[in-house]
Image: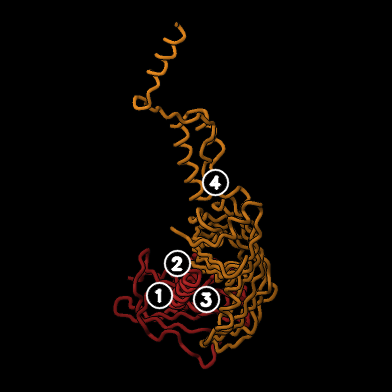
C-alpha cells in the first residue's frame, strides 16, 4: 500500500466512525421532568385503590382539584417553590352501614426547596428536603414519609394509610 | 668407459614421447570475502570451522535485518488532539483539546501523557436552561501497544489504555421552572458549581505519516467513570477530557511530530517502509 492509500483509509474510517457516533445520540429523560412527591394509598397494611377521593391544594389558584371523587391507588402532590409550606385537603366519601359520610383531612409539608440541575436530558427542577410532615386523622390513619428528599425519581415518597371503616 | 655408459642410459630415460604432466596449483591463503554486512560473529565462526553455528547465526542475522529491532528509546512524539474543536464547528456544544507527549519504546510500548482543557456551552432545544462548562484542565496518563512494531514508527495500529482526571467548574443559567398546578413561574441560576471526575479509557487507534516527521491519527475510546463529585444542586453534565457524563465513547483526532531518539533509529524511522501486518 502507498502512503496515499493509508491516508485515504484513515479518512474513510474516520467518516464511518463519525456517521456511527452521530446516530448514537440519546436525548431521552428516563426519570420525571419534575420532582413531585408520589403518595401511595393504603387501607390497613395493603396498597389499595381508594374510591371517593377529592384532593385539592389549600390556597391553589381557582380552587383547582388534583382529584375529584376519583378512585386512586396513588397520586403526585406538587409542592410550591415560592414558599416552604404546602398543604393539601384530602376528602374521602365513606359508607358505614347505610350511612354515607365524608371525612376531611389535611396533610401539610414543611420543606426546603432546592434548585437542582439533573441532566441535559431532564433539565432543571426543584428538589424538596422535607423537614416536617403533619396530618389530621379524621379519615387518615397515618402518613409515612419514605424519603426526606423528594427528587424526580418515580418511586413513592410517602404512604397514606386510610382508616378502614368496614 | 663408465661415463660413456652413464650418458647413454640418461639419454634413453628422457625420451619426449614417454613424459606425463601432473599439474600442481600453488597453495594460497586467499578466501572469498563475506557478503557485506555479515555479522562479525558469523565470520569468526566460519574461520574457526564451526559452520553449523555460523549457518544458524547467519539465519538469525538475516531475520534481524528483515525485521528491525528498534532500540528501547525509539522516538519521542508530541501531538495535539483537535477532534472536539473540529466537531464544534459542526454544532457540537462541548470540546476538549489536549497536547500529548509519547515515548516510543522498542516501537511497541508507548507511555503517554495528555494535558488539555475542556469547555462547554449548551442550550438544548425545548429545555429550560443554559449549561456553561468553564474552561477546566484535565490530565490523562496511559500507554499504547503498537501492533506494527516491525515496521516504521510512522505507521501504527495500536491499542491503548488511559486513566483520566479532571477538576472543573460549571454554571447553569437562565433556568426556568413552571409549576402548572400552583401557577408558579420561577427563574433561577445555579452558579459556581465544582466537581471532579476520575475515569478510565480503553481504545484502538491508527497513525499514518503525512510528511517528513509529521503524522496524523485517530483513536476511538470506550470509557467509563470510576468516581465523580456530586453536589446538592447538580450533577455535572460535561467532564473535560471525557465528554458528556452519560457517554460511553470518545474520539480523538491528532497531529503528531516525532523526534528520533537513537542515531541508527534515524535511518530506520526515515526509511518510509509501508506496513506489512
Dots 3, 2 in contact, CB < 8 A: no
Q: Nearer the viewer, mark 4 or mark 1?
A: 4
Report the label total: 4
Of the image marks 3 and 1, the number of the one nearer the N terminus: 3
Q: Do the residues at discs 3 and 1 belong to one chain?
A: yes
Q: Check the residue under mark 1 and report the chain it is in.
A: A
- Report the residue marked by disc 4: B36
Is B29 displayed left or right of A72 in the figure?
A: right
How many other residues sit within 10 Å of disc 4, few (<14), some (14-19) or many (≥20)? few
Q: Quadrant of the C terminus of chain B?
A: bottom left
Dots 3, 1 in contact, CB < 8 A: no
Dots 2, 1 in contact, CB < 8 A: no
The orange-tinted chain is B
- Report the residue marked by disc 1: A74
The label on residue A35 is 3
Q: Residue at image x 40%, y 75%?
A: A74
Q: Quadrant of the N terminus of chain B?
A: top left
x then y, percent, for residue A98: 29, 79
Q: Do the residues at discs 4 and 3 belong to one chain?
A: no
x then y, percent, for residue A163: 40, 70
Q: Looking at the image, which residue sits at the far right?
A: B192
Amino acid at each position: 500500500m502507498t502512503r496515499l492509500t493509508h491516508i485515504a483509509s484513515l479518512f474513510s474510517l474516520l467518516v464511518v466512525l463519525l456517521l456511527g457516533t452521530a446516530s448514537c445520540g440519546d436525548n431521552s429523560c428516563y426519570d420525571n421532568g419534575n420532582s413531585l412527591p408520589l403518595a401511595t394509598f393504603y387501607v390497613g397494611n395493603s396498597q389499595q385503590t381508594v374510591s371517593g377521593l377529592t384532593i385539592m391544594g389549600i390556597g391553589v389558584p381557582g380552587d383547582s382539584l388534583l382529584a375529584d371523587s376519583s378512585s386512586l391507588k396513588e397520586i403526585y402532590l406538587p409542592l410550591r417553590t415560592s414558599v416552604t409550606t404546602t398543604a393539601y385537603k384530602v376528602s374521602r366519601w365513606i359508607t358505614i352501614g347505610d350511612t354515607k359520610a365524608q371525612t376531611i383531612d389535611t396533610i401539610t409539608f414543611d420543606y426546603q426547596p432546592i434548585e437542582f440541575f439533573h441532566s441535559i436530558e431532564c433539565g432543571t427542577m426543584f428538589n424538596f428536603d422535607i423537614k416536617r410532615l403533619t396530618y389530621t386523622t379524621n379519615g387518615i390513619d397515618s402518613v409515612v414519609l419514605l424519603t426526606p428528599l423528594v427528587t424526580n425519581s418515580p418511586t413513592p415518597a410517602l404512604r397514606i394509610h386510610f382508616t378502614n371503616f368496614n | 668407459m663408465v661415463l660413456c655408459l652413464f650418458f647413454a642410459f640418461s639419454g634413453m630415460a628422457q625420451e619426449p614421447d614417454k613424459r606425463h604432466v601432473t599439474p600442481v596449483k600453488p597453495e594460497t591463503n586467499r578466501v572469498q570475502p563475506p557478503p557485506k554486512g555479515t555479522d562479525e560473529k558469523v565470520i569468526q565462526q566460519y574461520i574457526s570451522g564451526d559452520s553449523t553455528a555460523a549457518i544458524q547465526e547467519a539465519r538469525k542475522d538475516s531475520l534481524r535485518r528483515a525485521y528491525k529491532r528498534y532500540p528501547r528509546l525509539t522516538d519521542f512524539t508530541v501531538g495535539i488532539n483537535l477532534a472536539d474543536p473540529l466537531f464544534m464547528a459542526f454544532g457540537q456544544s462541548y470540546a476538549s483539546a489536549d497536547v500529548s507527549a509519547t515515548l516510543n519504546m522498542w516501537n511497541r510500548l508507548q507511555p503517554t501523557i495528555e494535558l488539555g482543557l475542556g469547555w462547554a456551552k449548551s442550550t438544548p432545544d425545548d429545555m429550560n436552561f443554559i449549561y456553561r462548562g468553564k474552561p477546566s484542565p484535565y490530565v490523562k496518563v496511559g500507554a499504547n501497544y503498537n501492533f506494527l512494531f516491525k515496521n516504521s514508527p510512522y505507521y501504527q495500529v495500536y491499542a491503548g489504555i488511559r486513566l483520566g482526571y479532571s477538576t472543573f467548574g460549571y454554571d447553569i443559567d437562565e433556568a426556568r421552572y413552571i409549576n402548572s398546578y400552583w401557577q408558579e413561574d420561577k427563574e433561577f441560576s445555579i452558579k459556581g458549581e465544582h466537581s471532579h471526575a476520575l475515569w478510565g479509557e480503553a481504545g484502538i487507534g491508527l497513525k499514518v505519516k503525512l510528511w517528513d516527521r509529521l503524522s496524523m491519527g485517530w483513536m476511538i475510546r470506550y470509557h467509563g467513570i470510576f468516581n465523580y463529585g456530586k453536589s446538592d444542586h447538580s450533577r455535572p453534565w460535561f467532564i473535560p477530557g471525557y465528554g458528556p457524563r452519560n457517554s460511553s465513547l470518545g474520539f480523538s483526532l491528532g497531529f503528531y511530530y516525532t523526534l528520533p531518539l537513537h542515531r541508527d533509529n534515524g535511518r530506520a524511522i526515515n526509511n518510509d517502509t509501508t506496513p506489512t501486518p
